Image: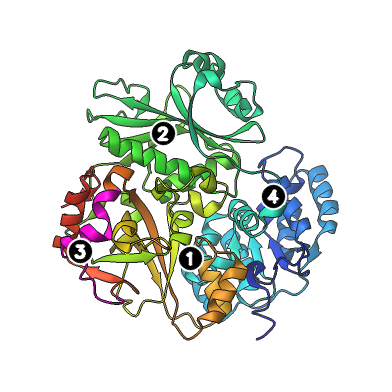
Amino acid sequence: MVEITRSLSLINIYKEDIQFVKNVKILLDTNIIIHRETEKIINSDIGKLFNWLDKINAQKFIHQITKQEINKLKDKDKKNTFSIKLDAYNELITLNKLEQEVESISIRYDKNENDKNDTLLLNEVFRGTVDILLTEDKKIHQKANLLNISEKVFTIESFLELVNREFPDLTDYKVLSVEKSYFGKIDLKDTFFDSFKEDYPEFGTWFNKKSNEPVYISMADGKVCSFLYLKIEEKDENYNDIEPIFSQKEKRLKIGTFKVALNGYRLAERFLKIVFDNAIKQKVNEIYVTIFDKRDEQKRLINLLEEWGFNKWGIKKSTGELVYVRDFTPKFDINYPRKTYPFISHNANNKIFIVPIWPDYHTELLPDSILRTESPDNFKEDKPHRNAISKTYISRSLNRDIKKGDILLFYRTKEKDKSAYYSALITTIALVEEKIDNITSEIEFIQKARKRSIFSDEELKKMWNDNQNNGSFLINFLHIYSLTSEQRSKLIRKRLLELNILTGEENELRGLKEITKENFITIIKEANIDESFIIY
């Protein structure tokens, strides 16, 4: 069993003078191989992926099933070409019998031969023959989650996110902050826009007409790497081109143009946060987007939209684009909070906790809650966890009676050499998505914490070993609302004591502190914030 838990998900690839532990075994699904070896570029990230696999000295494996699937190609020349290229990969020679847990999943969810083949790949990860599986198949990821091995199964994007976070010194570029700009300031000749020009013949003309309208962009090495354009549509908007037509006369937010070309930084999630923030501010009842599903980048975006509550509505008749809609009327689903994000409920069967966080970690985890005394240049979105809506907080609180749907109020503890009465304060409202408890090993701790925490694998390893007897557990949460600088002065420790929300007892905030719902309402009223996201 020692070998099975050896180097799961890059766990042993630590930085030692930029030298990496070799022999990490990565199994590549057929769709990854096809992306890599096809003459036509299907996924622009494939080159970055294989560049990183080489940098970390990964052993690249294929399964017998991949060879069998390639041999089924009807085009003889293409089949021969692929067969020759497959010789560049290591092959898993032995076809192992399904483990009992894997077989149980297969019986429940595999409907056809392709599904069963996918499960054979998962079986190799489950039993430890390989350390990581790379696949773009959505159903494989769903089954990996059911088998509790999702930490070992990556998409291209999530793998790039991992290596960019773990090895920033080797990253080829730095991502700048998302910034608000204007169409007229952006170079239409940038290759970023080539796919739009291919899909929409009139894109250039449309783009130039929008010269004075605002957009959100990110730049890397002087090139556009992400782009978001939003449009408010009033109740009298004409929707005759959409089938079925929008029958309700609603104020809507349209995601007019949305593309993220630079993956591995959770930029798409960052932009989605901007979409929801604008929807709250504009008080719309619905958000929608029209999108093709021809390219991998479009399919990934559709998967992301579905994850956050968008549902397929119909088509746009003039272009054939799919139409996805997100109901944005206030509602709260405690079982699937992403589907109703950013709404939270005061009336649900949930609790409210004040959560302490040290200044050294606060703005790294919650960059939107930056204080006026901090420099924004130190917290640009060049790390995945800074862009994410979903994040991980590591706790050793004795009180761990917390569950999905509970509300968190992050409390930034006092500054060094400053009075707690004026420097400690509540900055952020968040929502619990999951509690991960009963962690029994260092490997499990790192696997569970790494994807959304601010710490590297090395830091997590040290944290586990330094605090092995303290019962660390994880709180996965959704960032909901950052209190502005004008509001922060009202939520300092001094005021919280005056309101009897804090008692001033010693060690009162050594862990999670539950407060009443009446306390929560007091805090919200004291902050004088837009309460549109709260359901009373």
Q: Dot 1 corresponds to which residue?
A: 109
Question: Viewer-nearest of labels 2 and 4?
Answer: 4
- Disc 2 element: strand
Q: Looking at the picture, does residue 72 appear above or below residue 19?
A: above
Q: Looking at the picture, does residue 150 appear above or below residue 79?
A: below
Q: What residue type is labelled 1?
A: Tyr
Q: Is residue 44 left or right of residue 384?
A: right
Q: Dot 3 corresponds to which residue?
A: 497
Tags 2 and 4 touching, CB below 8 Å: no
Q: What residue type is labelled 2?
A: Val
Q: Which residue: 46% across, 40% down?
A: 271
- Judge the density around disc 1: few (<14), some (14-19), many (≥20) Cα neighbours within 10 Å: some
Q: Dot 4 corresponds to which residue?
A: 171
Q: Is residue 194 left or right of residue 38?
A: left
Task: Pick whichever, 434 or 468, lies toward us.
Answer: 468
Q: Looking at the picture, does residue 1 appear above or below residue 145?
A: below
Task: Pick whichever, 477 or 529, lies toward us.
Answer: 529
Tags 3 and 4 touching, CB below 8 Å: no
Question: Viewer-nearest of labels 3 and 1?
Answer: 3
Task: Pick whichever, 118 or 348, lies toward us.
Answer: 348
- Disc 1 element: helix
Q: Dot 2 corresponds to which residue?
A: 289
Q: Which residue: 25% across, 36% down?
A: 285
- Judge the density around disc 4: few (<14), some (14-19), many (≥20) Cα neighbours within 10 Å: few
Tag 4 or tag 3, which sits nearer the N-term?
4
Q: Where is residue 368 in the image (x, y as percent from the top left)?
A: 41, 47
- Disc 4 element: loop
- Disc 3 element: helix
Question: Viewer-nearest of labels 1 and 4?
Answer: 4
Q: Position of residue 138 (x, y in %)?
A: 53, 55
Q: How far apart are marks 2 and 1 (CA)?
A: 31 Å
Q: How far apart are marks 3 and 1 (CA)?
A: 54 Å
